[in-house]
Image: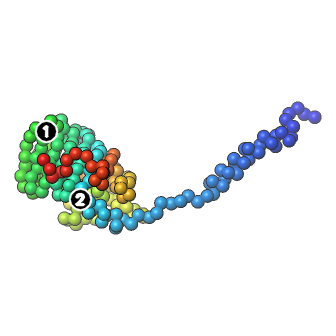
C-alpha cells in the first residue's frame, strides 16, 4: 500500500473547496441588478430650472500661447455668477463677479482689480486675459450638461440617452464621465475645444441644493 493520506481524509479535506466552488458558481449565475434607466428629458428640465448651484474642480488649458492648469469654484445664482479661479487665467488668483451687465475682478485678498461693462463684459475680460475668444455666457450651460438655449446646437447622445457630444457656436464639448449629485446625473469630466484652444474640466464636487452651498450668493457683494 502506498504511503499517503487516507481516502476518507482526502475527501473530507476537499469538501470546503468544492463548497466554495459551488457557491462561487451560483454567485456568477445570479443576475446583476441594473440601475433603472434615466429619464434624460426630465433630468435636463430639472437641471435647467436650478436657480442656485455650485461646482468645484480643476481646469487645464492648452492653446497656441501655451498652457496651464488651476482650480476653479463656480457659484451660479440666477443670471449672476461668482467664480474663483487660479492658474490659467493669469498670475495669482481671482474672484470674478459677473452679472449680465458687468463683470468685476477682485484679487484673492478682495482688492478691486478691474471692471468691464456691457453684455459682452465676460467675453471681453477672458479675451484680454487669454488672447482667444471664449463664449463665457454658454459655459454655465455646458458645464451642466445642457446646450445654451440662446443659440442652435447639435447633440449626440449615447444609447442610454446621456449627452456625449455637443456642438455649438463653433465649440465642441465632449462629455467623458458623469457622476451623481442630488439624485441627478451630472458631468464630472468634459473637454471643450474651440478656435485655438482646448480646455479640460474636471468637477470634483457638485452642490445642487441649498444645504451644501458655501459662501455668499453670486449676486451679493
Give how far apart the Cα atoms at labels 1 and 2 are.
Answer: 26 Å
Category of crowding for the residue at label 2, using alpha-carbon neighbours closer than 10 angstroms: few (below 14), some (14–19), many (at least 20): few
Which residue in the structure is indicated by mark 1? 110
Q: Is residue 65 above or below residue 192?
A: above
Instruction: Name the residue located 86 percent from the left edge and 33 percent from the top edge.
Output: 4
Side of 177 where 54 appears, left or right: left
Side of 97 where 206 appears, left or right: right
Q: Is residue 7 above or below residue 38?
A: above
Dot 2 falls on a residue whose secondary structure is: loop
Can residue 22 be seen in this snapshot?
Answer: yes
Q: Residue 61 location in percent, x, y?
A: 25, 44
Instruction: Name the residue located 56 percent from the left edge and 58 percent from the top edge.
Output: 32
Q: Quadrant of the N terminus?
A: top right
Give the mark, 1 or 2, whose residue is nearer the N terminus.
2
Instruction: Name the residue located 12 percent from the left edge and 41 percent from the top edge.
Output: 106
Name the outermost residue toward the right: 1
Can residue 170 be seen in this snapshot?
Answer: no
Q: Residue 90 location in percent, x, y?
A: 17, 39
Q: Residue 2 location in percent, x, y?
A: 90, 34
Q: Which mark is residue 75?
A: none
Category of crowding for the residue at label 1, using alpha-carbon neighbours closer than 10 angstroms: few (below 14), some (14–19), many (at least 20): few
Residue 172 found in image quarter: bottom left
Q: Are marks 1 and 2 in contact (CB under 8 Å)?
A: no
All told, the count of numbered labels is 2
Instruction: Name the residue located 19 percent from the left edge and 64 percent from the top edge.
Output: 150
Which residue in the structure is indicated by mark 2? 51
Q: Residue 85 location in percent, x, y?
A: 21, 42
From the viewer's side, name the closer residue of 131 and 110.
110
Dot 1 falls on a residue whose secondary structure is: loop
Name the outermost residue toward the top: 3
The colour scheme is rainbow
Amino acid at each position: 500500500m502506498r504511503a499517503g493520506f487516507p481516502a476518507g481524509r482526502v475527501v473530507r479535506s476537499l469538501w470546503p473547496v468544492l463548497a466554495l466552488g459551488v457557491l462561487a458558481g451560483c454567485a456568477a449565475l445570479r443576475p446583476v441588478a441594473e440601475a433603472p434607466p434615466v429619464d434624460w428629458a426630465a433630468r435636463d428640465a430639472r437641471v435647467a430650472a436650478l436657480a442656485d448651484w455650485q461646482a468645484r474642480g480643476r481646469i487645464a488649458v492648452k492653446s497656441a500661447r501655451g498652457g496651464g492648469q488651476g482650480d476653479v469654484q463656480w457659484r451660479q445664482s440666477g443670471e449672476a455668477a461668482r467664480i474663483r479661479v487660479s492658474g490659467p487665467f493669469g498670475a495669482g488668483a481671482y474672484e470674478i463677479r459677473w452679472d449680465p451687465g458687468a463683470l468685476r475682478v477682485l484679487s484673492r485678498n478682495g482688492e478691486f482689480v478691474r471692471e468691464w461693462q456691457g453684455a459682452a463684459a465676460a467675453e471681453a475680460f477672458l479675451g484680454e486675459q487669454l488672447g482667444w475668444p471664449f463664449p463665457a455666457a454658454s459655459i454655465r450651460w455646458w458645464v451642466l450638461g445642457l446646450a445654451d438655449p440662446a443659440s442652435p446646437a447639435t447633440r449626440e447622445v449615447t444609447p442610454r440617452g446621456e449627452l456625449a457630444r455637443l456642438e455649438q457656436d463653433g465649440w465642441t464639448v465632449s462629455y467623458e464621465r458623469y457622476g451623481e449629485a442630488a439624485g441627478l446625473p451630472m458631468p464630472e469630466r468634459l473637454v471643450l475645444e474651440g478656435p485655438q484652444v482646448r480646455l479640460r474640466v474636471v468637477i470634483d464636487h457638485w452642490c445642487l441644493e441649498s444645504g451644501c452651498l458655501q459662501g455668499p450668493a453670486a449676486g451679493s457683494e
